[in-house]
Image (cartoon, rainbow, N blue to C red):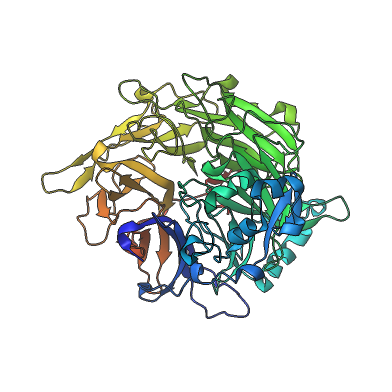
Amino acid sequence: MNPLFLCICAIVLVLAPARATETPDEPPFVYVGSYEAGSWLGHVQAYPVGAGGVAKVARWDAADLIPPWQARRIGTASGNANAIAFEWQQLDEAQRTVLSSEYLLEYLRGNDALEAKHGVGSFRNRQGKLGDIMYSAPLYVGLSDSAYQFLPGGAGGNAYQEYVKSKKRRQAMLYVGANDGMLHAFDALSGVETSAFVSGAIFDALPQLSEAGYIHRPFVDGLLSVGDAYLGAAGSAAWKTILLGATGGGAKSLFALDVSAPPAPAALLWQRSDEDDGSGASDGDMGYLIGEAFAVRLANGAWAAIYGNGYQSENLHAVLYLVELSDGGLIKKITIGAGDAEAPNGLATPALVFNPQRGVSAVYAGDLQGRLWKVDLSAVEPQRWQVAFSKAPLFIAADNGGKPQSIAQQSLLEQHAKGGSLVMFSGGKPGDGRIPGEAQKQSLYGIWDKAGSGPVSGREQLQQQMLSEGSDGTWQLSSNGVNWGVSRGWYVDLPEKLGYVIGKLQIIDGVLWLLTYASARDKSYLLALDYHTGGASSDGAFIGHLKNAALVEVPASTVTPIFIKLPDGRKQLVIAGRDGSPHAVDINPGTQPPVRTWRQLPVPAAVVDPG
């Protein structure tokens, strides 16, 4: 593998053994997904984590463990959601017309016999069967507990703990989307591919993969999520584990798979796209989804997929979707922010607030026009679900010159010490090309949604923190106090030198961590701050650096770092560098965690409203 052409796309940590009962001594892994530009070969590598930290050498690379093409279990859909095998005799007439020949289908399954290098055929030469993994991230599906045992018995509460126990007997899996047109499922312990799925939304583009002059394009390039749900008719309902997958820039689409019985192939539940909303009608609000959709229980007891509509929809608005988790039927679309050709809009991934009954009671989401919205979903009746604050945004992100800053990523929530929620996010369109338009100035915000109060008027209601570079190259962050009697939050403007925020914000032991990437300089920086104030962490966040250092330069990376705690108590953030292996940064184990009156739940950026 040539590191000069290697691009890291995703890293994920697994703290649970891959088979909890059969292999209790198996160490955890750090999974790294990557690709090689030019050949567009993908990799998914597993690095063991032991007493000394993350291993320098991968245990395996899934690219080397794809079964022979004839033996692969690959599924697709005929029509909207009629699951079939990805085999010539199973395809409908329209699909055969798209592929034109069985030879092309075999090529897509991994047969290289007709690649040009053999002097027989003319299909594009490949170096392997696994395509590039660019913006999709490996998703580990193993042991998890979403605390649904607190639901009423009729809603599955009595049966949930038995379902959680059954996961110990279930093979742990790793799922990832690739730009070979497939969602891949791998055994999380061995790395062997167990099955794959071809989304109907990208089917028409599959022939491009075989062209000798292939110009790279995304196929299954979005993020994945997984959640438990109690699905089925009364009297026969059962707990299931549902994977929601977006095709990212490959198509304006989302699909749902039942992944409850690995290593058997996932069962297709439904697909939705801009061309087919599941009923055969087009959907002009569906855009390219660059974030996740989540499987959740609503306040009325319905199980749903909830997601923002992404960007570049035909209608150009910002829209929140709630669809039936079992069949993809529309429950409700809430148009949040208008857009037009001059100012196109779209909604980012929502951050969720749960009520004590584990139903979603509210969401926060930003749009491409820099507006942070709150949607009230606390009512039982769907007709009462609506944008809060009389349909006004909670806050509008804008730089000091008044120029709006797009909110393209999911916000991070924490309960505020004085009640309500603290909503943290990065504002400013990134310069990675995924969202059309010029890059914008990057800023970090912490906005207090104060109970009983209205929207935040602007920066004048926020405490500013200053980030600056000293003559010795050390970056320092101010530590101005926030007077919560008058202030509604804080903000930090990021110097242009630092680039733009990568991936997700995360809080570890009371410290807000984020990674930036400066594409022009191919450098990354890890930034730590006190999430309560947006200022410097009082304990000093980095080991081996000055106590007042606010950030350190790290190996260039374009993915969210992950946190690990070693047996000796050391804490590290692991960053996927461009050399194809993970790099660890020691962080301060003495940093004090916040005092919480609520419990963190296994859904990203979610808090519980104590009610």
Tell which of 464 and 235 is nearer to you: 235
Tell which of 309 and 273 is nearer to you: 273
Above or below, comparing residue 144 to residue 348 in the picture: below
Q: Residue at x 26, y 42 (%)?
A: 520
In the current view of this chain or complex, which residue is farthest to the front? 120
Q: Position of residue 272 (x, y in %)?
A: 68, 40
Q: Residue at x 49, y 56 (%)?
A: 124
Q: Position of residue 316 (x, y in %)?
A: 55, 25
Q: Position of residue 163 (x, y in %)?
A: 73, 64
Tell which of 354 and 1 is nearer to you: 1
Residue 340 seen in the current view: yes
In the current view of this chain or complex, which residue is farthest to the right? 235
The N terminus, quarter of image: bottom left
Residue 587 seen in the current view: no
Q: Residue at x 66, y 56 (%)?
A: 147
Above or below, comparing residue 36 to residue 505 in the picture: below
Above or below, comparing residue 122 to residue 201 in the picture: below
| 42 horizontally vs 390: left or right | left
| 263 horizontally vs 372: left or right | right
Q: Position of residue 167 (x, y in %)?
A: 67, 68
| 463 horizontally vs 135: left or right | left
The C terminus, quarter of image: top right
Q: How many marks?
A: 0
